[in-house]
Amino acid sequence: MKLQIGVLLLLFSGSLYSAELVLKNGKILKVDAEFGQASALVVDNGRIVAIGDESDVASHINTGTQVVYTAAILPTVVAQANWQH
C-alpha cells in the first residue's frame, strides 16, 4: 500500500507544487547569510515559496502558471507607518 501511495504522489507531484507565478532567467539577490544569488523564484498565494535555479523551480510550473522572464530582482522592505497627529 505504501508503494502505491508513493507512486501516486510521484505521478501528481507537478500539480501538488504548482504556483501562480514563476520568475526565471534573472539575477535574484537573496538576503541570507551569504547574500547569494539565484536565477528563479516561485510565488504562490502572494508568498515566495521557492528560490533557486531554473531546475529547482521547474516542478512548480503547470499550464496555469504565469512565467515571467526577468533581468534583475532586488529585495525590498515595505514598512507601513500609522502616524497619528
Image (spheres, helix red, strand yellow):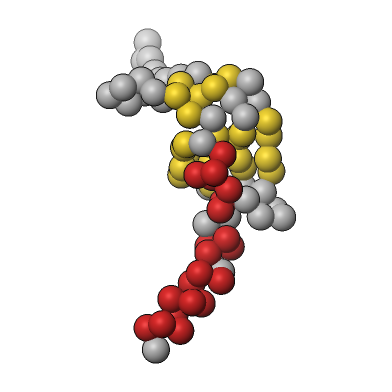
Residue 23 image offset from top left, x and y in percent: 60, 34
Left or right, residue 26 beside residue 47: right
Q: How many marks?
A: 0
Kindly give the residue lying farthest to the right in the view shown: 63
Seen in the picture, residue 43 relative to 15 is either above or below; the reply is: above
Kindly give the residue lying farthest to the left in the view shown: 33
Q: In which quadrant of the rendered view does residue 71 lie?
A: top right
Residue 66 image offset from top left, x and y in percent: 69, 43
* Nearer to us in this view, 78 or 23: 23
Residue 2 image offset from top left, x and y in percent: 37, 83
Left or right, residue 34 beside residue 70: left
Q: Residue at x 45, y 24 (%)?
A: 37
Residue 43 visible in this rendered orientation of the protein: no
Residue 58 visible in this rendered orientation of the protein: yes
Seen in the picture, residue 69 relative to 5 is either above or below; the reply is: above
Q: Residue at x 55, y 34 (%)?
A: 40
Seen in the picture, residue 76 relative to 56 is either above or below; the reply is: above
Kindly give the residue lying farthest to the top in the view shown: 85
Q: Residue at x 38, y 15 (%)?
A: 83
Q: Quadrant of the C terminus?
A: top left
Q: Residue at x 62, y 29 (%)?
A: 25
Residue 46 image offset from top left, x and y in percent: 53, 41
* Nearer to us in this view, 6 or 68: 6
